[in-house]
Amino acid sequence: MKHINILVILLLISSCVSHSTLENGILEVKNLKLEYQENPQGIDVEKPRFSWILEGEGRNRSQLAYQIVVSSDTQKLNTGDWDIWDSGKVQSNETNQIEFNGLELQSNSDYYWKVRIWDESGTESSWSNAANWSVGLLKFSEWKGLFISHDVGYDKTDKYDNLYLPPARYLRKSFHISKKVKQAKVYATALGLYELRLNGDKVGDDYFAPGWTDYNKRLYYQTFDITDEIKQGDNAIGAVIADGWYAGYVGYALLVRLDKVREFYGVNPAFMGQIQIEYEDGTTEIIESDLSWKASEGPIREADILMGEIYDARLEHPGWDTPNFDDSQWKSPKLYTYPNGKLEVHPGGLVKNIEELTALAITEPEKGKYIFDLGKNFAGIVRLKIQGKKGQKVTLRYGEILKDDGHLMTENLRKARATDTYILKGQGIETWEPKFTYHGFQFVELSGLSEKPALDAITGIVLSSIETNQSTFSSSNALNNKLYQNIKTTQAANFFEIPTDCPQRDERLGWTGDIQTFMRSGTYMADVAAFMTKFLIDLDDSQHWYGAYPNFAPFPYSRPNQYSPAWMDAGVIIPFNMYKVYNDKRILSYMYKGMEKFMQFQEDASTDFIRPPGGNNYGDWLSVKEKTSKEFVASSFYGYDAKLMLEIAKALGKKEDEVKYSKLFENIKKAFAKKYILDNGFTTEDTQTTYAVALYFDLYPSEELAKKGAKRLAQKIKENNYTFTTGFLGTKHIMPSLSKYGYHDLAYKLFQQTKYPSWGYSIVNGSTSIWERWNSYTKNQEQNSSINAAMNSFSHYAFGSVAEWMFQYAVGIDTEDSGYRNIIIKPAISKEMNFINGSYESINGLIESSWNWEGDTITMNITIPANTKAKIHIPTTSVKSLKEGNKAVSEMDAIKVIAFNDALAIVEVGSGTYSFNSEYKE
Ligand code: BGC
């Protein structure tokens, strides 16, 4: 009987499944995300946005409809009791930016969701795996915790010459749970930095909580589910807190002797949190930070992001974060008031341990000074594992490179002391990691030991807010493959809570020029959507009252006149890229008012549509040999802003503004051409940067003149022995501008160049990261003597902005619309490179593109994800010679040749994997 039933069901199913689905299999719904995160905890967005990707065999696969269901518990989700939201079957091919539209989300609640879709033939997919999110505390009245801290006194030392580095504060409370716990969560934050402890362990795996914001405007909190860690019986909660960005040293303030060098937001770090328990019997309880907690100092004697940490293991309070600890000697905490800013959920996710590095070698350039080589230049901390006598003091110093004499180079750290100290307790093997500092380094100097340490005395812990696993790149040139790795290393080192300029010296600020230059590149390496959303809130918060965006964000200094052309433009360029790459209109709306104000600020400053330089005017920062005028930089970026604003207004459906910005763009373009472009297509300043920027920003008055401009750029590069003269601004735009006008061979020559200034130059000189300067270092260090040692970072992603070209042109993956629904595959194919293989995990799924050109045959292997389309550009002498698999494309229905000009065919395809080959001669 049972068998017969199954047979009937199977027959029924198969009769519903269409022919094409049977051939291809059913699409699978994967990568469920909410607000760009997998199972985010503590969301406080009113209408969070869902996304997923589709995977499946075959070609031309797509989604006709979807259904999202949300329940208040897993059982309900499984049994079809979708009590929070059932979207019903929505006829739509959208798979991202879909807003939740169910019952009002409740504080301190969990939600479970899944999706199914109907494919191109109307066949229903299986339900996806379940995903979940939780909602934080939405109302101020729900916060019961008080901001508490330990009073460590205040030592007023000389502000500039003696550092003031107070100890970390320790806070604790034991508590008893007498009933069975159904669920327990902690909501926690701090003014400063905190690490939360429960029953002897760290809660969560984050670093640098609660993150950096303009604390006067907003403070983020974290949500941790501790249901499995809390016990029926005795428990203890603890928090260690330190100054962090809130009260510690920030940026270059000490170097340039600002009025304030620390305590930009407040003097005393303080912790606030509460455990929210739901018992099995339905009752609830809150255990909050208040005066019943106990406070003390402990082993962390100094803790500062820039300066480092001092840990005296003799001062440990063993078991302080476990229930039976006797805290009778500890004091009552001191109360602090709530901050002025809003309490919100961190939208980006915190810094995490993304990799651990084993030391490659130890050297001893001087007796007792051991240098560990961790193999690459990263941001993070180390785990120390040593043995010694009680009271023995071990010092750790950090450097990015070694001098010829084998010692660390630390001149470039400037006022960042970047030194950690560990004082042993003398009990067997001692392991230690600092909590509230980080360094940018490859080499660690360990001193103060009685004998040569083992290789595992030091382990490198790579910390970052992102994971650079969104793409792959390999080419026939190993040097370029190394460049790709170096860009990833440097992005990870600097996407650290905010996009910093560098991780080692006394700066580590969210420099806007650097990140606007690197933004699009960064999207090809990592999923930066949540991280950049958080940064854009910082940028919006830091906008000057008169409209300019500042030089960096958050902007803790009281220097209202700090802004700079090509830096402040980040306020338009970054949101535009969020839209382009992630199809995110919400961030555009969030920032729109600020962007308009910024445009008005520029308009007021301009005369006849030419924007004069102003503010700090960094120009084409760190260019070599050629100087582009500050006026040119200011005016060209003004034009680019107008061009992007017209796209942004269009995306938001603001018709009038679209017209307004399109007129503005035309006017700027006219004025710009009149002032800077000559009749022969040359620019008046004739620098590489002027051509690169004007071509990329579409500021040439006609295509004909633009071609002449591109030709001149090519000629100038040849005359300069295929090397750059460009700085941060020119470099980002030069490669795409060359490729846009067909100078692929030349672009590859630059790409593979090893002579100074070029990327290859850093690689032949042993780099593992992207340098701040073209000539930061040479193996022959005498040649370096002219370099400003203090201003010489080895971990600056700005020159890594070539990743944009590597993916858009070398690999050839771009989006025609926003969010890679209509993909462009247009690799720059050249005999200067044998092959390129690449892939990119877009918001719509995995795109792959690889090519090689052998003899007169080009082969291109392409994968286009389900539910997207692509226009593939294939060089070929004739449409006839163009084949996919072994079939002539001209005879295939599924592949449409939509254009053929100048030996280039454009074919349109749906999802699937394709292998094209064509005849093509140089
Ligand atoms: C930073 C840069 C930044 C620049 C402004 C530097 O100190 O490290 O990357 O953009 O200042 O010119």
Image (cartoon, rainbow, N blue to C red):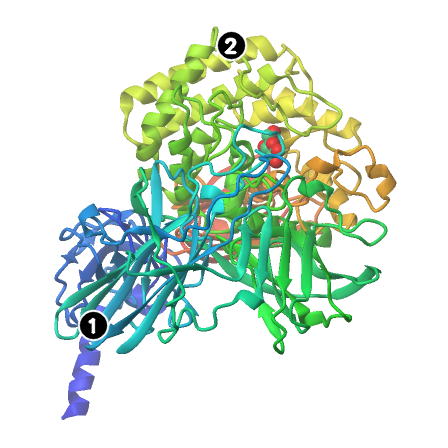
N-term mark: 1 or 2: 1
* Res. 907 in view: no
Q: Indicate which quadrant contains ligand 1.
A: top right
Considering the image in quadrants, where does the C terminus appear? top right
Residue 290 on image: x %, y %: 28, 56
Which numbered disc covers residue 15? 1
Indicate yes or no: mark 1 CB to ligand 1 under 8 Å. Answer: no
> Mark 1 is on which residue type?
Ser
The residue carrying mark 2 is 671
Local packing at callout 1 (Cα closer than 10 Å; few below 14, some 14-19, many 20+) is few
Residue 259 on image: x %, y %: 53, 28
- Residue beneath the point at 71% across and 45% down: 831
> For residue 786, what is the image quadrant?
top right
Say which element carries label 1: helix
Would residue 834 appear left or right of 324 to someone viewing this image? Answer: right
* Res. 777 in view: yes
> Mark 2 is on which residue type?
Ala
Residue found at the far top of this picture: 608
Looking at the image, is 209 positioned above or below residue 816? below
- Residue beneath the point at 59% across and 36% down: 158
Would residue 537 appear left or right of 738 to someone viewing this image? Answer: left
Looking at the image, is 593 positioned above or below residue 421? above
